[in-house]
Amino acid sequence: MLEYRLTPEPTLAAYSPGGVPDVRVVLAHGVPMMAMLRLPTRASDGRANLHVGGVGVGIDLASGRAIHAIWRDRPTVLHPDTRQPLSAIRIPRWDEILRLSARSYDAVPLGYMGIDVVIDIHHGPVILELNARPGLSIQLANRRGLRPALAELHPQAGAGGTAEQRVALGLAILNRVRHGA
């Protein structure tokens, strides 16, 4: 098996010494519900996985901006290796990442899944992998649970729509959950 060698785009690569950062988007019935940036560390041996010491940065679905970060399941404001402020992160090509994630549901229609996306310097957003069990640390990174957003989603709501409609639905749900409507 041959794989293309991904080269992270420079903005996020600056936060990832010795590894490749990725964005995880959690979908429910094809609708984006929550996202986080996963950053490798020296402790994680260059891997972005949180359970081996990577940093999880919660990302606002509407803007692609960092909202909170965790390292080893505890809040952090700086990357442990680079000492750069994590609150300054804004994900490049955010709208493309959301659409690509939502389109993945058309190929693999799981009820709940996580899509890991790398932003390659030459190819833009590229799917790294799809996860049937993406874990729940994303809730810690975002400082909110998935349950309120999932309660707003009717399983058939996103299934028949386009990727763009599913992204819009996810943003509308986020807005309702934020404002308690």
Image (tube, helix red, strand yellow):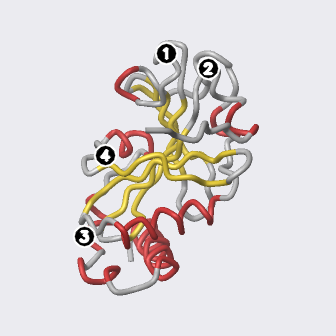
Secondary structure, mark 4, is: loop
- The residue lying at 60 percent from left, 36 percent from top is 5
Secondary structure, mark 1, is: loop
Viewer-proximal residue among 154 and 123: 123
Tell whether 176 sits left or right of 113: right
- The residue lying at 65 percent from left, 50 percent from top is 91
* Amino acid at circle 3: Ala
Q: Are marks 3 and 1 in contact (CB under 8 Å)?
A: no
Task: Name the front one of labels 3 and 1.
Answer: 1
Label 3: which residue?
151
Secondary structure, mark 3, is: helix
Task: Name the front one of labels 4 and 3.
Answer: 4
Label 1: which residue?
45
Other residues around mark 2 within 10 Å, as few (<14) / some (14–19) / many (≥20):
some
Label 4: which residue?
134
Quote the CA–CA distance across marks 3 and 2.
39 Å
Quote the CA–CA distance across marks 2 and 1.
8 Å
Label 2: which residue?
18
Measured as percent of width and height from the top left, residue 119 is found at 63, 47
Task: Name the front one of labels 3 and 2.
Answer: 2
Q: Earlier in the sequence, mark 2 or mark 1?
A: 2
Quote the CA–CA distance across marks 4 and 3.
19 Å
Q: Earlier in the sequence, mark 1 or mark 4?
A: 1
Q: Earlier in the sequence, mark 4 or mark 2?
A: 2
